[in-house]
Image: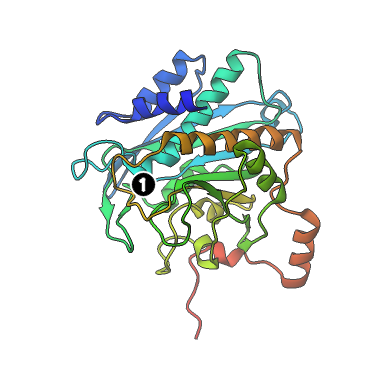
Amino acid sequence: MLKQVLEIVELLDDSGASGEKVRDLFGSRGHASTRVSTITGEEGQTDFVRLDFPGYVGASLGGQSPTIGIVGRLGGIGARPAQIGLVSDADGAICALAVALKLADMRERGDVLPGDVIVATHICPDAPVKPHDPVPFMSAPVDMQQMNAMEVDPAMDAVLSIDTTKGNHVINHNGFAITPTAKSGYLLPVAKDLLEIMRVSTGRPPAVLALSQQDITPYGNGLDHINSLMQPATATGAPTVGVAITAETPVPGCATGSSREVDIASAGQFVLETAIRFGRGACAFYAVAEWERLLHLYGSMEHFQGAGEVHP
C-alpha cells in the first residue's frame, strides 16, 4: 500500500492537481471507468472523483455480496494561495485513492474482491481556510449537502469515511483510529470485527476515536463537530465508521509538510482488508440482533440525521 500512497502523493502535490489527472493515472493502470464531476460552490470549485470496482459476486453483476463505500473526506488537498503544497487535510483523499489504486493493481494481477467497492472523494488544490479552535480547519468550496450527494451512494451497504483528524485534543495517537459505528442517528458500539482487523493489519492494539452525539448530526446546525469525518452518516441509513488519521499533537488541517505517508498506508491497508472481508460476509459493522432490540425499545433516531428543530 505504501507504493500506492507515494504515487498518489506525487500526483496530488501539484497546484494543477485535478480529477482529470486522477482519471489519467487510473486509465494507465487499466481502470477506464473513473467518473469525474466538476462542481462549483460559493467559494470555488472542486472535482469529485468516483471509482467503481465490481466484485465477482457483487450486486452490480447480480450477485449477493454486499457493497462497501470508501469515502475520502476533506475540505481540500491544498489551500493556495494561503499555503504552498499539500496540506494535512489531504490525507483522506490520498488514502481513499491509494486504496483504489491498490484495487486496480490487484485486478490487473487477477485478484478481484467478492463484493463491489465504490471509492469517492474530491480534488481541490485551492480550498479556503476557516478559523477553528484549537487549530484552523480547511473548509470546502461546496457545502456538505452537495458533498454527501456526490460521495454517498444508496448502493453502499456500509461506509468507511476516511478523514484527517489531527486538529483536536480528543485523541493523542500517531497513526489512525476508528470510531464507533453510526447508523440512522444512533451511535452504536465499536464493531468487534473492525477492531480485530485493525489488530491484525497494524500488529498493534487498536485505537478508537471517541465521538459525541452531535458529531453525527449535519453541519450547519450551530453545534460543534470534531470534523467532517462522520458527515456521510447523515446521508445514509447504512452503518458508517470513521477512519481517522491522527497525530499526538493538534495539527492544523491547513498545515503543509505534516502528512505521514506510513500512517496513511497503514490506514489504507486496514480499509482494504475490511473491504475484502465485508464482501465475503465475514465482517459486521454492527450486531443485527442488538440493533433490532434497540429500535424495538427506543424507536427511530433518524431525526438526528436532519437539521433539527427548535424545542421550547
Residue 259 vs 146, above or below: the answer is above
Give the image quarter of residue 258.
top left
Q: Residue at x 57, y 44 (%)?
A: 160
Residue 56 position, x and y percent, is 71, 23
Q: Residue at x 62, y 36 (%)?
A: 201
Residue 165 position, x and y percent, is 44, 51
- Is 39 on the left-hand or right-hand side of 83? right
Q: Residue at x 51, y 54 (%)?
A: 230
Q: Residue at x 46, y 56 (%)?
A: 172
Identify the residue position indicated by label 1 in the image: 75
- Is 178 on the left-hand or right-hand side of 284? left
Residue furthest out toward the bottom:
312
- Is 11 on the left-hand or right-hand side of 99? left
Residue furthest out toward the front:
204
Would you call the spot at circle 1 few (<14 residues within 10 Å), some (14-19), or many (20 or more)? many
Give the number of marks.
1
Element carrying mark 1: loop
**Colouring chosen for the image of the structure:** rainbow
Residue 20 position, x and y percent, is 36, 24
Q: Amino acid at mark 1?
A: Gly
